[in-house]
């Protein structure tokens, strides 16, 4: 029986949280992460880590959670009716990083594992995760690098994996009410169990480990670019799209709140400062307009630009 090794998954996820927090702290050079451990009455708990008011990062949250329950929320069983009547465990690392410099993109990454069990029956399990990038000012070489890392980590698992999960990311991180992608995408996958447990776990580890390979070079390349009030105001305006997506469309936010997760940890993805402006349109030909015309394009094959 291909029974998942839950303890090994948990150990990897906690190690990944440590590794990412150490690298982000080193990059920032000023602030460190505040850790809060928490327990959930229904079962499980987590480690929430948030860095605020850093030299480089205005806010960075890197959270680990492992929750357990006897009954799934209605939103989950509606999506997967075969889970009704099963106890479950859900664990994962989720991060959102909001840099201070508008030339450094905001980013999100998540790797997670879910298992639902019932006595006398085979467990239902899957992995999910991915990473995506939300720039305010686009640089083609950064986007090509981001997608090249994503493509390279997918390649050992089949030629179809990167295109499939890249498209899934484009489709998922799309603000339907704006008819606009949230950013330039990356990878997104869910319900991953079509391979055996070891292969699915190995792929998820590659995604988790690939995040820093994709993000750190962009941060290091853009961190010294000077910026002023114009760039700051555009950054705050575009952060509004991030808030809209997470509160209106994101399934993880909904599941976390409905399953009794820690609200502060779930909403750590929100930027510390944000603004909205009625019917805003960037000046034609401006760097702000270029974000819309050249980068917020669903379905674009960025790997072609690397040839």
Image (tube, rainbow, N blue to C red):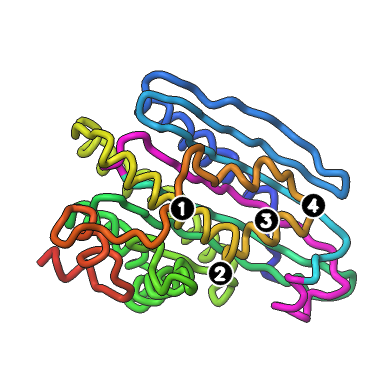
Closer-to-camera residue (187/272) = 272
Mark 2 burial class by Cα count in 10 Å: few <14, some 14-19, many 20+:
some
**Badge 3 element:** loop
Q: Earlier in the sequence, mark 1 or mark 3?
A: 3
| Horizontal arrangement in the rendering, residue 63 relative to residue 182 (left or right) | right
For label 2, the residue is 190
- Work out how far the residue at label 4 is from the one at label 3, CA to CA, in angstroms: 25 Å
Quadrant, the N terminus: bottom right
For label 3, the residue is 5
**Badge 4 element:** loop
For label 4, the residue is 260
- Work out how far the residue at label 1 is from the one at label 4, CA to CA, in angstroms: 26 Å
Badge nearest the viewer, 3 or 2 = 2
For label 1, the residue is 240
Q: Which residues are magenta?
A: 75-104
- Work out how far the residue at label 4 is from the one at label 2, CA to CA, in angstroms: 21 Å
Image disc number at residue 17: none
Q: Position of residue 296 (x, y in %)?
A: 30, 66
| Horizontal arrangement in the rendering, residue 23 relative to residue 217 (left or right) | right
């Amino acid at each position: 029986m291909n029974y998942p090794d839950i303890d090994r998954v948990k150990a990897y996820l906690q190690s990944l949280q440590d590794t990412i927090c150490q690298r982000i702290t080193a990059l920032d050079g000023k602030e460190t992460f505040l850790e809060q451990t928490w327990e959930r009455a229904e079962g499980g708990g987590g480690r929430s880590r948030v860095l605020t008011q850093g030299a480089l990062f205005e806010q960075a949250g890197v959270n680990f959670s492992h929750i357990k329950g006897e009954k799934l929320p209605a939103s989950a069983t509606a999506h997967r009716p075969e889970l009704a009547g099963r106890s479950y465990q859900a664990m994962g690392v989720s991060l959102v990083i909001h840099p201070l410099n508008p030339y450094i993109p905001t980013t999100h990454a998540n790797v997670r594992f879910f298992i639902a069990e019932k006595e006398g029956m085979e467990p239902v399990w899957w992995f999910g995760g991915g990473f995506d990038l939300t720039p305010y000012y686009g640089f083609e070489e950064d986007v090509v690098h981001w997608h090249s890392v994503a493509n390279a980590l997918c390649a050992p698992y089949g030629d179809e994996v990167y295109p499939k999960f890249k498209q899934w990311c484009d489709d998922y991180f799309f603000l339907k009410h704006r008819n606009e992608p949230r950013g330039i995408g990356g990878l997104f996958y869910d319900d991953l169990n079509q391979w055996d447990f070891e292969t699915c776990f190995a792929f998820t580890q590659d995604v988790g480990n690939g995040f820093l390979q994709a993000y750190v070079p962009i941060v290091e390349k853009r961190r010294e670019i000077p910026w002023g009030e114009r760039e700051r105001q555009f950054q705050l305006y575009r952060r509004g799209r991030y808030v809209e997506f997470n509160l209106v469309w994101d399934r993880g936010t909904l599941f976390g709140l409905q399953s009794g997760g820690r609200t502060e940890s779930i909403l750590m993805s929100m930027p510390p400062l944000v603004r909205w402006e009625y019917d805003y349109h960037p000046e034609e030909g401006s760097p702000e307009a270029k974000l819309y015309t050249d980068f917020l394009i669903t379905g674009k094959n960025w790997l072609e630009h690397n040839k």
